[in-house]
C-alpha cells in the first residue's frame, strides 16, 4: 500500500536484495507480490518467536534473587532497573538480564519509592486527590518527573492505569499495549505474581482502582454535555497535533478557551501550570489560522504553473485507476489458485483420504472464498473512462484555493497544512511566529539543476507569519 502511494507520487522503492523489475508490468507485479509474501511470512515468523521468547522471559525467576526478569523498557516511577550477569551463551557472550527494585534515590528528603507510596495511598486513596492536585503537590515539593523536571497531568493518568497499579503491587505485567499504543484486553496480558518488590499491596491497588473509576464517572457526568458537543463538531483547532510548537521550551501549542475566546497556548500552561516554560503567550485562534492559510495560499500559487498542476492531478487520477486494474489481476490470480486447491482436495478424497471432516470444511471454505472473489472481480469489470481535467478548471481551483480550504473540516485543513508546512515556531518572549515551509510540493519531481544554480529545494525555509506584516498584526 505504501509503495503504491509512493509510486503514484513519482517515488519508486528499489530493493537492494531483489532483482529490478517494473511494477506496472504483469511479470513485475508477480515478482512484487511474491516478494511481499516472502517478507511478510518472514516477519510473522520472527514476531512469533520473539513474542514466545519474551513471554518465557517475564515468567522466569532469577535463581539467586527470586524475582522475575524484565523485557526492557523504562521502569515505573518508584522503581529502578538493574542488570545481572547469568552465565554465557553458545558463542561465549555474557547473558545479561534486567530486574526491578525499589528506587531508593533520595529526592526532597525521602526515597523516590516512598514518594510513590505517599501519592498512591495518602493522596489518591485516602484524599481522592485529582490528577491536577497530585501534579501540583509533586511540583510544589520539587519532586522531578521521570523524564522532565516538572510533572504533567497525563503522566499520572498513565501511572494510575490498572496495569500500572498491578506492577506497584509487585506483579509483572507484559503485553498490555499493542501496535501504536493500543490497549489490549486484560485477558491478553501476561501477569506474573511476586515479580519484583511491591510498593503497595494488591488490596490497596484494588481500592485505588475503585477510586479511579468513581472519579472517572464523576468527571464524565460533569462534562457529558460539553463532550457530546465536542464529539459532534470535532476539534475546533486547525494547528494542534505538533504543527505549532513553543520555541522557548519545545512543547506543542494546544487549544485553550479563555472567557469565551479561543487561543493557542504552550502545552506547559495547560498541563504543568506554566512550569518549565515561563510567562504564557495567548495567540488568538482565528488570527493565527488566517495567517497560516494566507501563507499556504501564497506558496500554493507560487509552486506550479497551470500545466504542471494539471498533469499532477491527472496522474493522481490515473494512478487510482491503475490500482483498480492491479487489484483485478491479483483477484484473478487468486481465483486460479483457489480452483487448483479445490481440485487438489477432490483428488485427495478420491485417492482415499480418511479425514473427510477436514476435506468438507476445506471445500466449503474454498468455495466461499471463490464466491467472494468472483463478486469482487465482477464489481471491477466495468471500468469508466478516466475523467479529464482541463486548464480552466485547474486555474479556477488555484484562484479559489483559500475559499476551498475554508470550507473543509479542521481535520482536512490539518492534513492539507502538513503538505505545505513542516513546523511553526512561536517565541513567547517576542511574539514572533516563524513558519517553516517546504520549498516545493512533495508530490512534484525535483526540477533539473543548471550548473552553478542554487539548490531548488532547500531544507524548509523560514518565513515570518504573514510575510510583509508585523507580528502584532496577528494579535501576538
Image (spheres, rainbow, N blue to C red):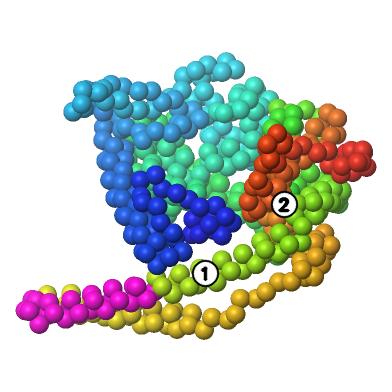
**Relative image position of residue 268 (x, y in whole percent):** 71, 35
User: Taking 390 as reference, is 467 left or right?
Assistant: right
Q: Nearer the viewer, mark 1 or mark 2?
A: 1
Q: Is residue 420 above or below residue 58?
A: below
Query: Element type at marker 2?
Result: helix
Observer able to see residue 305: yes
The image quadrant that residue 265 belongs to is top right
Q: What residue sits 61% from the left and 27% below the top?
A: 148
Q: What residue sits 44% from the left and 59% below the top?
A: 22
Query: Element type at marker 1?
Result: helix
Mark 1 vs mark 2, CA separation in Å: 28 Å
Could you tell me what secondary structure mostly forms the magenta stretch?
helix
Which sits in the foreground, 466 or 357?
466
Q: Is residue 458 above or below residue 315?
A: above
- Disc sitting over residue 283 in the figure: none
**Relative image position of residue 432 (x, y in whole percent):** 84, 34
Which sits in the foreground, 140 or 28?
28
Observer able to see residue 222: no
The residue labelled by disc 2 is: 417
Question: Are circles 1 and 2 on residues that touch, CB within 8 Å?
Answer: no
Q: What residue sits 10% from the left and 82% below the top?
A: 350
Q: What residue sits 32% from the left and 55% below the top?
A: 38
The image quadrant that residue 452 belongs to is top right
The residue labelled by disc 1 is: 322
**Does the magenta run of residues contain 350?**
yes
Q: Quadrant of the C terminus?
A: top right
**Relative image position of residue 218 (x, y in whole percent):** 64, 53
Q: Earlier in the sequence, mark 1 or mark 2?
A: 1
Amino acid at each position: 500500500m505504501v509503495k503504491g502511494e509512493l509510486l503514484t507520487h513519482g517515488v519508486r522503492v528499489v530493493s537492494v536484495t531483489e532483482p529490478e523489475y517494473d511494477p506496472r508490468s504483469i511479470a513485475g507485479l508477480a515478482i512484487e507480490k511474491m516478494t511481499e509474501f516472502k517478507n511478510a511470512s518472514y516477519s510473522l515468523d520472527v514476531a512469533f518467536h520473539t513474542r514466545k521468547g519474551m513471554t518465557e522471559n517475564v515468567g522466569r525467576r532469577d535463581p539467586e534473587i527470586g524475582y522475575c526478569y524484565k523485557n526492557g523498557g523504562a521502569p515505573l516511577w518508584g522503581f529502578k532497573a538493574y542488570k545481572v550477569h547469568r552465565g554465557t551463551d553458545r558463542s561465549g557472550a555474557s547473558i545479561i538480564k534486567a530486574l526491578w527494585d525499589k528506587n531508593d534515590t533520595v529526592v526532597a528528603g525521602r526515597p523516590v519509592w516512598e514518594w510513590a507510596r505517599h501519592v498512591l495511598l495518602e493522596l489518591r486513596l485516602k484524599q481522592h486527590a485529582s490528577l491536577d492536585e497530585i501534579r501540583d503537590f509533586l511540583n510544589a515539593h520539587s519532586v522531578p518527573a521521570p523524564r522532565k523536571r516538572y510533572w504533567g497531568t497525563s503522566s499520572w493518568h498513565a501511572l494510575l492505569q490498572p496495569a500500572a497499579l498491578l506492577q506497584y503491587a509487585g506483579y509483572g505485567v507484559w503485553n498490555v499495549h499493542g501496535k501504536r499504543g493500543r490497549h489490549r484486553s486484560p485477558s491478553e496480558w501476561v501477569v506474573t505474581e511476586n515479580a519484583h518488590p511491591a510498593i503497595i499491596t494488591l488490596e490497596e491497588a484494588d481500592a485505588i482502582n475503585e477510586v479511579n473509576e468513581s472519579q472517572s464517572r464523576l468527571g464524565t457526568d460533569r462534562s457529558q454535555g460539553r463532550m457530546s458537543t465536542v464529539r459532534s463538531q470535532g476539534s475546533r483547532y486547525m494547528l494542534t497535533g505538533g504543527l505549532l510548537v513553543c520555541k522557548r521550551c519545545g512543547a506543542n501549542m494546544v487549544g485553550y478557551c479563555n472567557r469565551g475566546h479561543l487561543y493557542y497556548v504552550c502545552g506547559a500552561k495547560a498541563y504543568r501550570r506554566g512550569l518549565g516554560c515561563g510567562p504564557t503567550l495567548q495567540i488568538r485562534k482565528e488570527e493565527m489560522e488566517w495567517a497560516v492559510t494566507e501563507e499556504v495560499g501564497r506558496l500554493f500559487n507560487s509552486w506550479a504553473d497551470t500545466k504542471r498542476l494539471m498533469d499532477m492531478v491527472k496522474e493522481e487520477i490515473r494512478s487510482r485507476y491503475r490500482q483498480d486494474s492491479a487489484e483485478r489481476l491479483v483477484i484473478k490470480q487468486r481465483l486460479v489458485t483457489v480452483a487448483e486447491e479445490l481440485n487438489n482436495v477432490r483428488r485427495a478424497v478420491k485417492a482415499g483420504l480418511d479425514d473427510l471432516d477436514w476435506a468438507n470444511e476445506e471445500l466449503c471454505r474454498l468455495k466461499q472464498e471463490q464466491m467472494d472473489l468472483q463478486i469482487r472481480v465482477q464489481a471491477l469489470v466495468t471500468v469508466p473512462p478516466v475523467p479529464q481535467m482541463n486548464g480552466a478548471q485547474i486555474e479556477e481551483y488555484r484562484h479559489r484555493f483559500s475559499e476551498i480550504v475554508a470550507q473543509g473540516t479542521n481535520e482536512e485543513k490539518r492534513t492539507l497544512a502538513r503538505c505545505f508546512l513542516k513546523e511553526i515556531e512561536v517565541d513567547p518572549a517576542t511574539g514572533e511566529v516563524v513558519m517553516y515551509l517546504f520549498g516545493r510540493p512533495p508530490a512534484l519531481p525535483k526540477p533539473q539543476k543548471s550548473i552553478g544554480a542554487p539548490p531548488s529545494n532547500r531544507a524548509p525555509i523560514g518565513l515570518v507569519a504573514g510575510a510583509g506584516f508585523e507580528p502584532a498584526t496577528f494579535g501576538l
